[in-house]
């Protein structure tokens, strides 16, 4: 019997509701599999914790999380806590601290999912975005000078290392080679003459190691346009930390909405735990009302299973989500249904049991 030890950081707002659904699905799947046991340990980290203790997580929080195979994260952010604190002192601290340098975000239009683009079919939107997750624009290097004076200055530096660029690009190329897909690198080398020119140069170099893989390069503004006008041209996408964050929200918008967008923060070497999350935020306006869509959180369980080598069950979960979308009987209001958050996990497990 294989065992996965999972640290649960449900976090804020709708986080606890959607994470509860994901836990139910993983427990149910483990029962169906028969050879997997899962053990969840809850951590109270998040904005409520901050309001009580002045910290988003314990000083030694990373040491505590280090002992787990995976982290299952809900959402972070709450009115009254500055967004840079809630994100920077928890989610980003974990990503950096555990060298989760790959952020894998599928942008896949499932059958039955709403798409705002006219004439677009599910087969037209099926990409995987490989977002650099440890440096770039998110490196948090900078300064504030001359506060509260007319000369006030804010500096924010992007960090693009050869090591950081090469490893994320190779990761994208490996997926593309395995799945016989093209890689599109998205940058902004015309305007960001140091960081993004460097990114483009490294992409060109790394692409020579993969002569069998078709490549494309796009400026981020053009890429945003093509996500809407011709999403079919994208298969594997590799891009920087900030561009990846923005483009995958756009990706979510064209592929069913934020309620269906999952993300995996991976340390591929498994030296540290990887973290799995719905990419949406805490949505405090709908928290506690049973309105939140837990399908993204459930999809991220599929990503977790895939990362641990259970590809068959990972696919079955995504296929169960698709069945739910096609049947249209048990969907939350964002997808046009009347079901509550708590109705979704049992419906998914029913499909998986059939
Ligand atoms: N699901 C975690 C969460 O609350 N994410 C919100 C967010 O702002 N994420 C930014 C990022 O992924 O870089």
Image: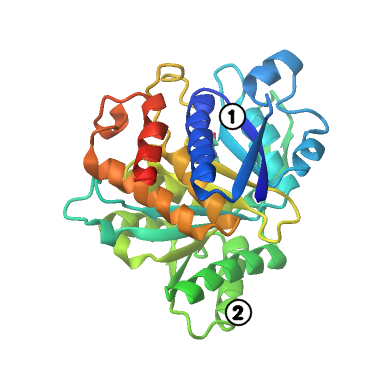
Measuring from the top left, give residue 237's x and y in whole percent: 46, 63
Q: Quadrant of ligand 1?
A: top right
Where is 58 relative to 27, above or below?
above
- Residue at 27% across, 61% down: 124
Measuring from the top left, give residue 305's x and y in whole percent: 55, 52
Q: Is residue 275 found left or right of 187 in the rendered image?
A: right
Measuring from the top left, give residue 30's x and y in whole percent: 54, 44
Which mark is drawn over residue 85? none
- Residue at 78% across, 33% down: 61
Q: How far is mark 2 from mark 1, CA to CA?
A: 41 Å
Give whichever of 302, 247 is nearer the camera: 302
Quarter of image, res 71: top right
Q: Element under label 2?
A: helix
Q: In terms of sequence position, does the residue under pointer 2 or pointer 1 come before the other?
A: 1
Q: Is residue 96 found left or right of 349 in the rendered image?
A: right
| Disc 1 target residue | 10
Q: Is residue 338 found left or right of 177 in the rendered image?
A: left
Q: Is residue 245 visible?
A: no
Crowding near the residue tagged with mark 1, few <14, some 14–19, many ≥20 C-alpha atoms within 10 Å: many
| Disc 2 target residue | 205
- Of badges 2 and 1, the one in the foreground is 1
Give whichever of 3, 311 is nearer the camera: 3
As drawn, which residue projects farthest toward the left? 119
- Residue at 62% across, 44% down: 37
| Mark 2 C-beta to ligand 1 under 8 Å | no
Where is 341 relative to 198, above or below?
above
Q: Element under label 1?
A: strand
Quarter of image, res 343: top left
Measuring from the top left, give residue 232's x and y in whole percent: 30, 64
């Amino acid at each position: 019997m294989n065992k996965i030890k999972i640290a649960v950081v449900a976090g804020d707002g709708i986080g606890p509701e959607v994470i509860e659904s994901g836990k139910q699905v993983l427990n149910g799947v483990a029962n169906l599999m028969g050879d997997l046991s899962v053990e969840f340990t809850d951590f109270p980290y998040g904005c409520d914790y901050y309001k009580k203790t002045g910290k988003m997580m314990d000083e030694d929080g990373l040491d505590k999380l280090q002992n787990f195979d995976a982290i299952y994260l809900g959402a972070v952010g709450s009115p009254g806590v500055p967004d840079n604190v809630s994100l920077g002192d928890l989610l980003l601290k974990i990503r950096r601290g555990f060298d989760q340098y790959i952020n894998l975000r599928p942008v896949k239009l499932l059958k039955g999912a709403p798409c705002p683009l006219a004439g677009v079919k599910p087969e037209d939107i099926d990409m995987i975005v490989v977002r650099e997750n440890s440096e770039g624009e998110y490196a948090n290097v900078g300064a504030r000078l001359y506060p509260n004076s007319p000369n006030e200055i804010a500096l924010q530096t992007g960090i693009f290392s050869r090591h950081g660029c090469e490893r994320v690009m190779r990761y994208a190329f490996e997926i593309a080679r395995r799945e016989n897909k093209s890689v599109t690198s998205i940058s902004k080398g015309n305007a960001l003459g140091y960081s993004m020119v460097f990114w483009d140069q490294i992409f060109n170099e790394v692409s020579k190691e993969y002569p069998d893989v078709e490549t494309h390069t796009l400026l981020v503004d053009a890429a945003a346009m093509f996500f809407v006008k011709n999403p079919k041209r994208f298969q594997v996408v590799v891009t920087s930390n900030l561009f990846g964050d923005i483009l995958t929200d756009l990706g979510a918008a064209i592929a069913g909405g934020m309620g269906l967008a999952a993300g995996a923060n991976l340390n591929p070497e498994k030296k540290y735990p990887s973290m799995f999350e719905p990419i949406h935020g805490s949505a405090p306006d709908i928290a506690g009302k049973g309105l939140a869509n837990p399908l993204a959180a459930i999809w991220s369980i599929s990503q977790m299973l895939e990362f641990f080598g259970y590809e068959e069950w990972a696919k079955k979960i995504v296929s169960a989500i698709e069945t739910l979308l096609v049947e249209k009987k048990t969907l939350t209001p964002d997808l046009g249904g009347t079901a509550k958050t708590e109705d979704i996990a049992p419906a998914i497990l029913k499909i998986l049991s059939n």
